[in-house]
Image (cartoon, rainbow, N blue to C red):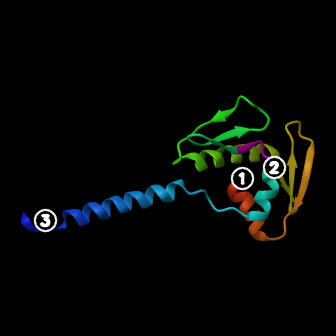
Amino acid sequence: MVSLKKYLPFALFLGFLIFGLDAFLQSKPSPKNKRVYQAVQKYSPYYLDKRFGGLQIMNKEDSEFKIKPNNMTLFKEFERLEKEWGKKHLQLKENQLIIVDNNGSQLSTLPLQDKKEIDFIHHYYGI
């Protein structure tokens, strides 16, 4: 019994370290293609806004829309909203990403330069 007490602080430290790392990895946003994501982000209605208790998700089109997730789920919720918007407003045709508005009229066209950008569109936005 005495020998187990010697290892108890080390085991607790290791357990909390593992749980902390797991929480950190789960709350990280997924990797993005910088050029494509920044171009699409200009047209996305969702953005992060600072508030007293942290960050909240706002909508440019609807001033009543506010989501205040906790810090652990903030980026996952933001990505879910972006992906939902992207499935409705992004179209991929012949290495070109077409961004449309709510009425279906074309807002912009982004030529995709390589396979990595096309893979990002398929993986991140699901189109």
Give the residue type at disc 2. Answer: Leu
Q: Nearer the viewer, mark 2 or mark 3?
A: 3
Q: Which residue is mark 1?
A: 125
Residue 11 screen position, x and y as percent: 25, 64
Q: Is residue 80 left or right of residue 41?
A: left
Q: CA distance from mark 2 to mark 1?
A: 8 Å
Characterize the local packing of mark 3: few (<14), some (14-19) or many (20 or more) Cα atoms within 10 angstroms.
Answer: few
- Residue 68: x %, y % from top left: 59, 37
Residue at image mark 2: 90
In 3D space, how far apart are the residues under numbered discs 2 and 3 (Cα atoms)?
59 Å
Q: Position of residue 13 (x, y in %)?
A: 30, 63
- Res 96 → quadrant: bottom right
Q: Which residue is rendered at x = 13% and y = 65% of the image?
A: 4
Tell which circle, 3 or 1, labels the residue nearer the N-terminal end: 3
Q: What residue range appears in magenta?
A: 43-47
Q: Who is closer to the viewer here, 39 or 63?
A: 63
- In this view, the residue farthest toward the front is 52
